Amino acid sequence: MKHRIYLGDNIDILPKLPERYFRLIYIDPPFNTGRQQKRKRLRTVRDENGDRTGFQGKRFRSEVLSEHFFEDEFDDYLAFLRPRLEQAKRVLTNDGSLFFHIDFREVHYCKVLLDSIFGRESFVNEIIWAYDYGARSKTRWSAKHDNILWYAKNPKNYIFNFEAIDRIPYMAPKLVTPEKAARGKTPTDVWWLTIVSPTGKEKTGYPTQKPLKLLERIIAVHSNKGDHILDFFAGTGTTGVAADNLGRYFTLIDNSPIAANVMRKRFGLFAPEVITCATK
């Protein structure tokens, strides 16, 4: 297998993938927020009777270009995840890693589940992805981070390419030597990275899209060129874009035809075969 996309339910597809084949798995499953996740893509058009006021009082009308959504609520979230995570362990190489992306609502339950599947000794890090965008709550501390749990199949043998870590600026560069300031420092387990800009070229309009830089950091450090990367909640295919940028091969799985179409457009000329799989 090289680059490949499967359109179908991952619980039907994962058992058919080869054992101990993928060096790295990243997944960003539904977060079980209890609400519908949706995203609209809009454009504004000059209209004297429009619903928006712009520069110098000019009026504009909003037009919906596309709308993507999915229901994010499960009767038994852990029962939904368990068989999929058991398959993830099966298809990981013996020195492979799983990165599980979730938020504060379910992270503690998911860690206990992952401990039971991989073993507590296989837990390496909890990475906090912190961002600073969007509305602020007036009734509690605003939630502006996600949690990423890193599990190594073998905690004594895994890929960690230290030299591949992208460095970040010192907050007080005058307190270190000029050489250190120029080189920058390596990130900790708290990663300050902006979300995908709502108006940027990277934005696809799909709900819960994660930034490319986040995936490139994970893939660069935790796999090698030529390795196979798996994402079985692929969404817009950011994992695939990052993998291809870094010389890795990817396998992506998603059950949404909308997501598959977004990926086809996003991958452009090197678009892999999209395999439609019938559900049981």
Image: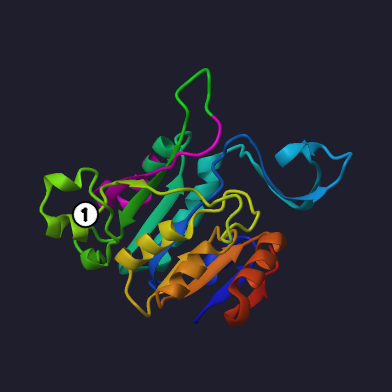
Find numbered disc 1 in the image and state the secondary structure of the residue it sits on. Answer: loop
Left or right: residue 85 compared with residue 77: left
Residue 238, percent across and down?
52, 63
Three-letter amino acid code at the position of disc 1: Lys
The answer to whether any part of residue 18 appears in the image is no
Numbered label tally: 1
- At which x and y percent is residue 17? 50, 72
* Residue 202 rendering spot, x and y as whole percentages: 56, 60
Depicted 143 relative to depicted 171: above or below = above
In this rendering, the answer to whether 4 lies above or below 104 is: below
93 or 138, nearer to the observer: 138
Within the image, what quadrant is residue 110 found in? top left
The residues colored magenta run: 112-135
- Binning the other alpha carbons within 10 Å of mark 1 as few (below 14), some (14 to 19) or many (20 upward) gives some
> What's the residue at 53%, 44% (across, down)?
79
- Quadrant housing the C terminus: bottom right
Q: From this viewpoint, is residue 187 visible?
A: yes
Scheme by which the image is coloured: rainbow
Q: Is residue 59 magenta?
A: no
Q: Which residue is mark 1?
A: 185
- Residue 123 belongs to magenta span: yes
Q: Residue at x 34, y 67 (%)?
A: 220
Would you identify the image quadrant in which residue 269 lies?
Answer: bottom right
